[in-house]
Amino acid sequence: MPTPHISAETGDFAPDVLMPGDPRRAKRIAETVLQDARLVTEVRGILGYTGTFDGRPVSVLASGMGIPSIAIYATELFRFYDVQRIIRIGTAGGMAPHLEVGDVVIASGAHTDSGISANKIPGMHYSHVASFGLTAAAAAAGGIGPGSAPASGAGTTEKGNGRRRRRARTGQVYVGTVLSSDNFYADRPTTMEALVKHRTLAVEMEAAGLYAVADAEGREALAICTISDLLFKDASLSAEERELLFDRSVALGLAAFADA
Ligand SMILES: O=P(O)(O)O[C@H]1O[C@H](CO)[C@@H](O)[C@H]1O
Ligand SMILES: O=c1cc[nH]c(=O)[nH]1
């Protein structure tokens, strides 16, 4: 039964869905990670596939950018396709000083400047919190257990193409809060500094909306983000590094689906 934004039929989606922002990443995950993946929707170029991983059915559907977009796709998957769990596989800008490009942030909670969910219950400041089971399983797959301290450390730098470029370490995994912002180009250093002081790790644009939709629909969600750039330092990843490290987040998401 197609919806306004998804052309798949009932039963076309698996109960577990990986959700990158970029439709090309959805295609890449389907082609390089899933087995026997078939295209199930492509309305507006938002590609969705269903296949298997280690014998378990898994789907992948892009979310587009921003909370309004991910809220549409997450609501339709949960409400009309009986999807049970969505893990956003995204990128984020590193805010905390110990983060390096290539690190992975498992977003246990999300602050937001978006009005879409913060005021959903009158008089309340809504808490945007990930599924505990998925968070714990992803953290365990990333080597984080009770009592283990988050590792910190500097990446190395090298001269590349006349530019100073920060090389990714192997990629540390952290669990903590992110900012889900409505405004990619907002210039507000004081706000960002205050968020860092309150232990916010990174900024992206969807996790809070996904968590609010999962709560409303009685389902589970998590966001796992690869740090693609640093807000307060000059740093970048090569295209190959970006894909490789992105694959790591996909692996953590698939492990969380299997183990939670
Ligand atoms: O790489 P994705 O998953 O799209 O995530 C990040 O990149 C986009 C902004 O460039 C926003 O969607 C942000 O959340
Ligand atoms: O700085 C960044 C990087 C990725 N995504 C964001 O929203 N911001």
Image (tube, helix red, strand yellow):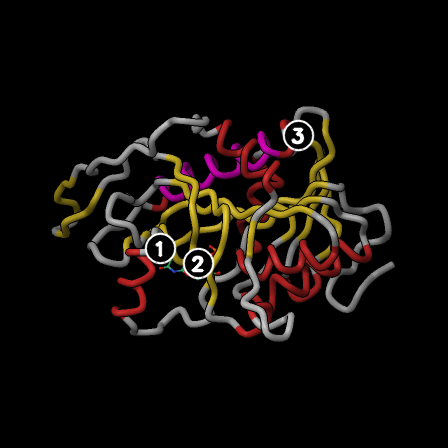
Q: Name the residue under label 3.
A: 53
Tell me the residue at 44%/66% (across/down): 181
Disc number lying in front (3 or 2): 2
Vertical side of 170 occupied by 62: above or below: below
Mark 3 vs mark 2, CA separation in Å? 27 Å
| 151 sits left or right of 182 in the view | left
Examine the structure image and report whether residue 130 is included in the region drawn in magenta: no
The kind of residue tagged 1 is Gly
Segment tinted magenta in the rendering: 240-256
Disc number lying in front (3 or 1): 1
Pick the front one: 187 or 109: 109
Vertical side of 250 occupied by 83: above or below: below
Callout 3 secondary element:
strand
Give the mark, 2 or 1, whose residue is nearer the N terminus. Answer: 1
- Could you say where residue 83 lies in the image, as x and y percent from the top left? 75, 47
Q: Residues within 10 Å of mark 2 (few under 14, many from 20)?
A: many
Callout 1 secondary element:
strand
- Could you say where residue 146 lies in the image, as x and y percent from the top left? 45, 27
Q: Name the residue under label 1.
A: 93
Question: Quadrant of residue 95 in the image?
Answer: bottom left
Single out the residue that lies furthest toward the front: 123
Tell me the residue at 66%/66% (across/down): 44
- Quick check: is the Cβ at mark 1 less than 8 Å away from ligand 2? yes
Q: Name the residue under label 2.
A: 204
| 184 sits left or right of 40 in the view | left
The kind of residue tagged 3 is Phe
